[in-house]
Image (cartoon, rainbow, N blue to C red):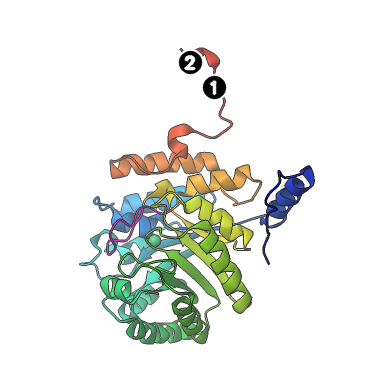
Amino acid sequence: MGFTPRVGSSPSSGTIFFVWSWLVVHLPSSVTIVEVSLRDGLQDEHTTLSTADKAALCRDLVGAGLRYIEATSFVRPDLVPQLADAEELAEHIPAASDVVYAALIPNLKGAERALRSGFRTWHLLVSASETHNWVNIRRTVSQSLDELGQVAAIAAQAGVALAGYIGTAFGCPFEGHISLTKVRRLIDAYAGMGLNHITLADTTGMANPRQVYETAMSLQEAYPAVVFGMHFHNTRDLGLANVLAAMQAGVTRFDASLGGIGGCPFAPAAGGNIATEDLVNMLSEMGIDTGTDLDRLIDASRRLESLLGHELPSRLPKVGKAYDLHDPAEIR
Ligand code: ZN
């Protein structure tokens, strides 16, 4: 379904009310945030944080109310040295029975390591773009799917929960436009492995809100048993606009990264993820529950900034919350 605005005349109050109620009724009452700063965020930083600093960051995230955290990736340590301590970190993240700790699993070897480390939720990844998949994972899309099928079989046997990620789902910096047919091929493959949580990743921030809305509407209609999530990068400042468009299409699961850090080491100009604190600010101002404490997120983001030693892209730690009021005497 869609909404066709009236053209050729100024909008009546009835039209304005209709637009407003259409917007409101298509917003969720709550949203799940998948926090990815420890993985997507840190993998793109020049500074490699110590395991102790990562564990402290993880405690900050949990303390601020986040309940789904992608903690690391079992990639080759020589390719992504920032995440080389995956096994060690698994022993130091705060134990909390109500927090989902996920690990990104790029291949069979990663699955074996994650299993030994006790991760009970795995994120699988393949790119819709053949070129990006090759640059990122050194496999063709078909080779990746074969291997992920074996990973999914191990997970099923071990009772591990799975979510499937589709990289470059909205565009590729090497191939340009990505057709929905390519994306659907990967959803079909994931569904064939028994997955019903699938996240579309805008790896290099190429998506726009209209594309996101139409993609989400089309895929949810075609795959009613699948719960779709979205992973947006803010490369071109469209991250939160894309979240709004996705929510209007019914999506309620979004990845975000504290401080807005992140990027893909294997793609040009990837840009950071949408910032968790900026996302929470937008959602809470709109009356949408995230279960998080914005003040604690802002404090955690400032601590992360001092650990990393450079300015982070998020806005809220710089400008404060909308209703942090100021004394007019401060203005001269
Ligand atoms: Zn990403």
Mark count: 2
Instruction: Decide which of 1, 59 is in the foreground and name it.
Output: 1
In the visual, does 294 lie left or right of 74?
A: right
Over which residues does the magenta segment extend?
262-273
Can you give x and y, in whole percent of width and height, for residue 29 in the image? 68, 54
Can you give x and y, in whole percent of width and height, for residue 28 in the image? 66, 57
Toward the front, the furthest residue is 8
SS for tag 1?
A: loop
Instruction: Decide which of 172, 52 is in the foreground and name it.
Output: 172
In the visual, does 125 lie left or right of 308?
A: right
In the visual, does 47 lie left or right of 225?
A: left
Task: Say above or below: 115 vs 322.
Answer: below
Task: Say above or below: 215 vs 63.
Answer: below
The residue that disc 1 covers is 326
Toward the left, the furthest residue is 78
Amino acid under disc 2: Ile
* Ligand 1 location (quadrant): bottom left
Picture quarter with the N terminus: bottom right
Can you give x and y, in whole percent of width and height, for residue 193 in the image? 49, 85
Amino acid under disc 1: His
Looking at the rendered structure, which numbered label has been put on residue 331? 2
Residue name at image x 43 percent, y 69 percent: 169
Contact (Cβ within 8 Å) of mark 2 with mark 1:
yes
Task: Say above or below: 265 vs 162.
Answer: above
Which numbered disc flags the more N-terminal residue, 2 or 1?
1
Res 197 quadrant in image: bottom right
Can you give x and y, in whole percent of width and height, for residue 251 in the image? 59, 63
Q: Is residue 269 magenta?
A: yes
Q: Within 10 Å of the Cα at label 2, are there few (<14), some (14-19), or many (20+) other Cα atoms? A: few
Q: Within 10 Å of the Cα at label 1, are there few (<14), some (14-19), or many (20+) other Cα atoms? A: few
SS for tag 2?
A: loop
